[in-house]
Amino acid sequence: MKTKYFYNAFNILYDLVKESLGIFQKEELYRQLFQAIYVMSGDALYDNDSIRKITSGNQTIHLRAVKKLHTPEGFEKFRRDIERVCLTNINSPVDVANKLLEQCEQVSEETGRTIKSSFNDDTPYQISRAVAAVLIFLNHADYASSKGKHTVLNIDFMRLGEEQPLLSYPKFITNIPNAAVDRLVGRIDEINEVYQEIVEGDGKLMVTGVGGLGKTVVVQQFLNKLQNTPTEESQIEKIAWIPYDNHDICLSMKQALHLKCDLEDVWQAVQDLCADSKGRLLFVIDNIENIGNDEFLGKLSMLPCRVLITSRQKILRGFNRIMYLPPLKMAQCRDLFYQHYQYAERDNEVLNDIIDLTAKLTIMIVFLAKVAYLEELSLHELYAKLVECGFKLSEEDVSCEHEKMQNDETIIRQMCILFSLVNYSEEDKRVLTFISLIPNLQFDFPKAKKWFNIKKTAVCSDYIIWVCWSMSLTAENIFTGCIL
């Protein structure tokens, strides 16, 4: 080779750790530092003679291993092994890092300054990162020299601007969304489809369906799966959960991400955040009911990150991959009903008739089950009351293929009919009156109980609040239709 930059730097490191490690060959240090990388590349470590070609400066690191070193995951594994093997066996790690940085500056003043400027703290992470960066960069310099090239190494994979190591699993950079259902019924195929599109596909997906069908639950369950998937596999490091206020996506992002900039600067700040994340960020925009005049909704697909949306709309500019969420199957609907109807009675024929009246709309099934349980209704009694009051949803009302999915009027009207099954009191009416004054935003039970001074025994009131919240329907419409 024309140059031996890596050889010189590796010698410095070896001379400082060989005694404390009790090793007498540079090849042994090479094995300890690079073993995980060779495993990643699917290659076994070579014999001493092959490794000696590298540690003697006559050959660069094997290309299959280099390809893994030039990834965030590979670099992080290498950095960790340097910290584990070397830093604990060196008296003055900072001095070692500075000596190696001097080697780096001799090769490329610009890249050397970039790596050196990132080393601004004496933490084990910063020191080991600097050492790893220098060794990888010098190996590239040797390779370019041997080929007679003058290529510039893109060092983004080193994450020199980050203050913390690469996460093993994705984490939220916003508030974590409310917990999904306690026990999921069905939706395994849908969750897997979301995973395939976001993790393995092009990373842009809109999940669409009528309100109350379970879009948000599917996405939440996908996020649970994602959080338990190693970052190395998913290539997703950060998750941002953005509840959309259905007026201004920039304002929603500003609030969720706790941005300090002015509203007019939010979109640029979001673009910068995506760029800094190098495609390893996932934005989840929940509950786009209406597009309206929000121009930035049409730009979401242009963000250099992955974007997952839940919406009642069937089309959003830039999103070519759309998953139309279907209703649960009949057996799954029965399972869901019985999960909340805690009596021993089981009559699947009658229950099938009840579920047919709901057109398999998930939230209606849950609401009916809870009402029947609280009012101590048998399945026959529940069905008779529903028929008597004229409750019925059609498949068109909940179909993703039908225009009605963007209009809540039919569902609101049927929900008002269901309220007639609940023996709510004057106090409950007062609660609904208060709800009618609340904007169409999500709120949880503890806050609602505190606001309205609802005692724990007022279960029916809880369910009325819960329905308004879960359906994302305007409380004013429900209040007007059911009370006045």
Image: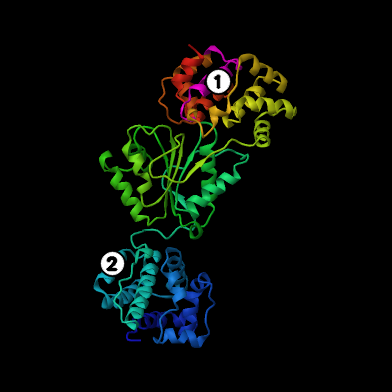
Earlier in the chain: of badge 2 and badge 1, it is 2
Residue 401 picture location, percent across and down: 51, 34
Residue for badge 1:
414
Kindly report the distance in space between the C-alpha atoms of the residues bearing marks 2 and 1.
Answer: 64 Å
Q: In this view, does 151 lie to the left or right of 184?
A: left
Tell me, yes or no, whether the highlighted magenta stretch contains residue 407: yes
Q: Residue 343 magenta-drawn?
A: no
Q: Where is residue 61 in the image (x, y as percent from the top left)?
A: 43, 79
State the SS at label 1.
Answer: helix
From the image, state whether disc 2 or disc 1 is nearer to you.
Answer: 1
Q: Residue at x 55, y 21 (%)?
A: 415
Residue type marked 2: Thr
Label 1: few (<14), some (14–19) or many (≥20) C-alpha neighbours in 10 Å: some
First to last magenta residue range = 405-426
* Residue 445 visible at all: no
Q: Quick check: can you spot residue 392?
A: yes
Return the residue found at the far left.
109
Spot occupied by residue 110 in the image (x, y as percentages of width and height): 25, 70
Count numbered badges in the picture: 2
- Residue, x 42% and y 66% (percent of image)? 71
Say which mark, if any, is on residue 37: none
- Which residue has dot 2 on it? 114
Up-down: is 20 above or below 438? Answer: below
